[in-house]
Amino acid sequence: MIKASNGSVNLSLVPSETKNGKPGLVHPLTNTDLSPAPAHGSTLHVAYQGVPGSYSEAAAGKSYPNSEAIPCDQFDVAFQAVEFWIADRAVLPVENSLGGSIHRNYDLLLRHRLHIVGQVQIPVHD
C-alpha cells in the first residue's frame, strides 16, 4: 500500500508491507513512475508525512491546491518519493508551535539534497 503531520513547507508514498512483513512497494517502478514533473495541465503529486486529515496534508493542499497528495509514514520516505520521481514535490514541517524546529528534517534536507522552495503556515487549533 502506498502511504505517504503537523507542520509547514512541501506527494508522498509509504512503503507497504509484503507477505514477509518487510517494507516494499505496491508495484515495481515503471518509466511512468519515474517521469519528470508533470507537463502543464497534468496533476502534480505532492508527498507529505502523515495520514489523510493531518495538518501536513492541509499544508500540502494549501501549497499545491490542485495536486494529488500522497501520505508517507516517515519523513525520509517523503524525501525518497521526490528523489525517485514518484512525487514531484514534498511538503514537510521544519518548525511547529509545540516543539519548535524539527531538526530531523533539516538533517534530511542536507542528506537528500532537496531544496526549500516555499513556506506555508497552518494554524493549529486545540
Image: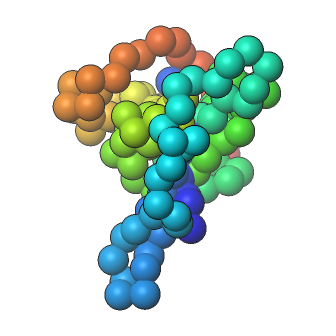
Query: Which x, y percent locates residue 7?
Result: 52, 34
Query: Which x, y percent locates residue 47?
Result: 54, 40
Taking the spot 26% from the left edge, 31% from the top edge, the residue there is 112
Whether residue 120 can be seen here: yes
Instruction: Give the total number of marks visible in the rendering.
Output: 0
Whether residue 57 can be seen here: no
Relative to residue 66, is residue 86 depicted above or below?
A: below
Colour setting: rainbow
Q: Left of 10 or right of it: where is 62?
A: right
Relative to residue 19, is residue 120 depicted above or below?
A: above
Residue 26 vs residue 73, the one in the foreground: 26
> Which of the 4 quarters of the picture holds residue 82?
top left
Residue 43 vs residue 54, the one in the foreground: 43
Residue 41 vs residue 104, the one in the foreground: 41
Query: Which x, y percent locates residue 57?
Result: 64, 41
Taking the spot 66% from the left edge, 41% from the top edge, the residue there is 69
Taking the spot 70% from the left edge, 51% from the top edge, the residue there is 53
- Position of the N terminus, as image quadrant, is bottom right
Name of the residue lying farthest toward the bottom: 20
Relative to residue 99, is residue 101 depicted above or below?
A: above
Taking the spot 37% from the left edge, 34% from the top edge, the residue there is 83
